[in-house]
Each structure stands twice: as C-alpha cells, then as structure tokens.
Amino acid sequence: MKSQDLMPVHTGAVIEDDVLTLGQLCHACGVHADWIVSLVEESIIEPQGEAIHVWHFTGASLVRVRSALRLQRDLGLNLPGIALVLDLMEELNTLRAQRKTN
Amino acid sequence: MQYKDYYKIMGLARNATQDEVKRAYRKLARKYHPDVSKEPNAEAKFKELGESYEVLKDPQKRAAYDKLGTNWKAGEEFRPPPNWDEGFEFKGGGFTGTDSSAFSDFFEQLFGHAGFSQANCGAQGFATRGQDSHAKIYINLEDSFLGATRNISLSAPEIDAHGNVQLKHRSLNIKIPKGIKPGQHIRLTGQGEPGSSGKAGDLLLEIAFNKHALYRVSETDIYLELPVTPWEAVLGATIKVPMPDGNIDLKIPPNSHQGTKLRLKDRGLPAKTPGDFFVVLQIALPPANTERAKAAYKNLQHELDFNPRLTLGVKRL
C-alpha cells in the first residue's frame, strides 16, 4: 500500500459549458469586472445571454482570460493584439493536434 | 547564493542603451512567453528574463548592479560587498514586477523584501475570500473514458513569516470524472489560497490529455487511424479494432478508400452528450520483397491497367 492510498480522495465539480457568471469568472481569475467587460467588447471571450446580469461563460473562458492577462502584463499587448494572438494560438494548437503523432 | 549575469541572460553588452534593453526584452519575451513559446523550458527562461529586465530597465537598480563589478561569473558563489547599495534610492519603492515573488535569491539579496506584501494580495476587492488558484493537470485518455482516481502533485510559491519565498509542495488524490474533455475544469472547493476571513478560495484544475499512442482527441470525439490492406478496403472486411475499453469487430464497407472515415456513434468520450469514435482508414501497401509478391503486383498491373493520374491531364509513358 502506498502512502497516497491513505489520503482522502477529493471529488470536485466539473465546470460544464456556460455555467460561470461574471462574478465567478472575475474571482477565479483575480481580475476586475470592467476588464472582463472590455474583453467581451473585443470579442476575446463570448458569453451566452443578452444582458450583463445574465451573462454566462464557458470553462474555456478561464484559460483565455488568464492568458490575456499574462499577455497584457508581460508583453504589453493591447486588446486587439491579445485577440489576434489567442486566435492564432488556438489555430496553431488545433493544427498541432491534428498533425500525425508519428 | 549565485551571481546572475543579467546582461548575459538578455544577450546585451554592458554598455547597452536603455532603448536596447527594452528592445531585447520585447524580443526575448515574445520568444519565451509561456503562452506562446514552444521552447522546452520557456517558463524558467521567462522568469529569468523578467528578473533581468526588472533590474536593467531601472537606471538606479542597473547602476547599483553595475557597481558590483564585472569580475563575477554567472553561477559563481556571491556575497554582496558591504554597503554596496549606499546612496541608491530604490529600497522604498520596491520592485514593480507582478511576479516578483518568483525572482531569485540573488535578486532578493540585492533589492530587498519591499513589495513582497503586494505580491500575494492579487485580486482587487475580494478581501473576504481567498483567491482561486489554478493548475493544469495531464491525464490519460483512459482516465476520462473509464473514470479514475489520480494522485497529483502541486507546487506553489509561498511567503513565510520572514518574508522569504518558498516552494510549497502538496499532493492530492482527486477523482477524474468520467467523460471529462480536454480544456474542461474541475473545481475543488476550498482548496485554493486561504482568505482573510478564513474561507479559502477554490482550486481550479484544467484538464489536458497526455499524447496517446493510438488515439487523438478532439473535444469529446476520439480518432483512430486504422491501417488496412488494399483488398480489405476494396472488397470490404470485418476486422478487429482496439477501443479504449476493449476490442470490437468493425465492418469495413466495400469500395472504401484512403481516408474513409467510419463513425461509431456515441463511442467517444462518455460526456453528458457523448462524443463519437471515428476510424480513419489508412491504406498500407504490402511490400514486394519476394519474387512471388512482385509477380502478384505485375499480375495486378496487367489485369487492371489502372492510371491514377488521369485527372492531371498527362499521358502515361
């Protein structure tokens, strides 16, 4: 028996698509709501729902918001630049995944 | 503590202008930024770069650093000379880098603890609850396909009572829910950073899949490239196909060709809306390494008179 077998097993909740509210997204990424709103205006992340108080974000938005934050802080990119980088990176990752493994 | 050559890290001469420092930083930052870099140790390189830039971009810190002299070699055991920082006014201001908690001992020895207190407060306006923390974990496709319990190790920089940064390691057993897909998150309530009111933040785990020898995953769909013989593809056949949960007998329809995609509905990742399993046919040519095999190919050539280049508009020789 390994020592890790003695530790409790944590069961988490899966963040399904379209479940994060604006407040949850802000808290999870440690950013201000104004900044999230400006990301939405730049179409960097796209919420479901018409008005801001019923906005819902996908779990994948978490990754994009945090990347956006780092790109802005570390490379000094503006929002259109961040949008372009994230879209190109996504395309690149898709292509890399499709490329044959051998 | 080891001496760090900030100029060498940034590829600069010691007499580089402030503009050159900035340009070198921008260029290297693009190359090593963990979000865009494909370099193997991008994150470590980027941290080192950030630290170098933090010193060299600030004329006061740079002057103080230069005063240490040029006789040091990178990695050499280092002790700052007494009163080396006399007359430099950077102590109060601290440093501005957001990730300064990750800077080296060398940096800390020279430029002090100021600023460490801000490194940890992070989010604005959420004083009551601790911040959520993030980690990416790699699982195998089978873990999602069948559900599993995995032990993961996490490490995070932590500031101790003396203001020193230390890497804190911990390990957690977590349940991998059946059907989770790459890019999805698991939220572990209360496993994030401690809050001022005692309520800790959450730990958010981003799921990524290890590369698999057989399968490729896209969202909830699984792809398998299946080698088949030319006659299996043309005449049709029933062949054994390895699925993540065991082999199945798959019927290849006659007149299939290279790249034909066969869909097994709902046999992908068992998510709430299950994905599909796709078999992509790859026609493998039998080698002609014996006289009999060559004769068989010649016979085929004679019997079929096949020209695959008709659409190219060139006549066969």
Image (tube, coloured by chain):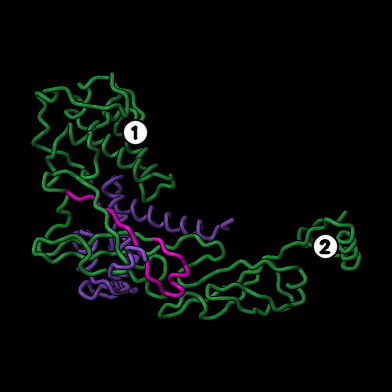
Farthest-out residue, front: A1
The residue that appears at 11% across and 44% down in the rendered structure is B162
Query: How far across and down, in percent of the image, does residue B165 sit?
Result: 19, 45
Q: Secondary structure at mark 1?
A: helix
The residue at which mark 2 appears reads as B307
Check disc 1: other Cα within 10 Å, few if <14, some if 14-19, many if 20+: some
In the rendered structure, does residue B200 fall within the stretch colored magenta? no
Check disc 2: other Cα within 10 Å, few if <14, some if 14-19, many if 20+: few
Magenta residues (range): B138-159
Subunit bearing disc 1 = B
Instruction: State the residue in front, B25 or B9.
Output: B9
The residue at which mark 1 appears reads as B24
Residue B20 visible in the shown view? no
Circle 1: residue type: Ala
Left or right, A93 with reference to B97: right
User: Considering the image in quadrants, where does the N terminus of chain B appear?
Assistant: top left
